[in-house]
Image (tube, grey):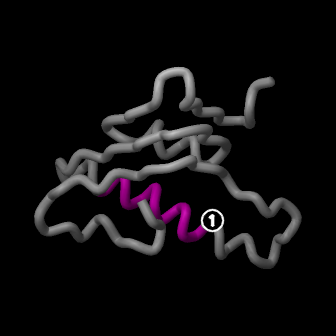
Amino acid sequence: MDVAKNPAGQPDRVPEPASGDLFGGIRRADLPTQKEIFIPGGAMFRDLTRLSAAGIPTIALVFGNSTAGGAYIPGMCDHVVMIKERSKVFLAGRHW
């Protein structure tokens, strides 16, 4: 799911899967630009909850590792599709 899209306004009620390797924020110390990452990301979380509340299924397709903030997306979706022995979700970073 592209964070630039607004899935909450889908008139046909067709699910739009969030797909790919979902990573958390990469920039750590660049505080002036954090709003460019976290505001759109927060909007995506909001849209997922609105879709689910409206009865539109939310789906996450995880192809590889989902870490940090990106791990919330599969956790918040109604359905999650993962690849056996390849897809992993790490809330606090990858387990070594």
**Tally of marks:** 1
Please rate how many residues cluster around mark 1, counting C-alpha atoms within 10 Å: few if below 14, some from 14 to 19, many from 20.
some
Q: Nearer the viewer, residue 94 or 72?
A: 94
| Vertical order, 33 against 92 (above or below) | below
Q: Nearer the viewer, residue 39 or 94?
A: 94
- Identity, as a three-letter code, of the amino acid under mark 1: Phe
Q: Quadrant of the C terminus?
A: top right
Image coords of residue 4 (percent x, y): 45, 74
Q: Which residue is mark 1?
A: 38
Q: What residue is shown at x 58% (from left), y 70% (from top)?
A: 39
The stretch drawn in magenta includes residue 89: no
Outermost residue toward the left in this view: 12
Please indicate whether residue 57 sits to the left or right of residue 83 in the image.
left
Outermost residue toward the right in this view: 29
Q: Quadrant of the N terminus?
A: bottom left
The stretch drawn in magenta includes residue 43: yes
Image: magenta residue range: 39-50
Which quadrant holds residue 78?
top left
Q: Nearer the viewer, residue 24 or 54?
A: 24
Image coords of residue 31 (percent x, y): 82, 71
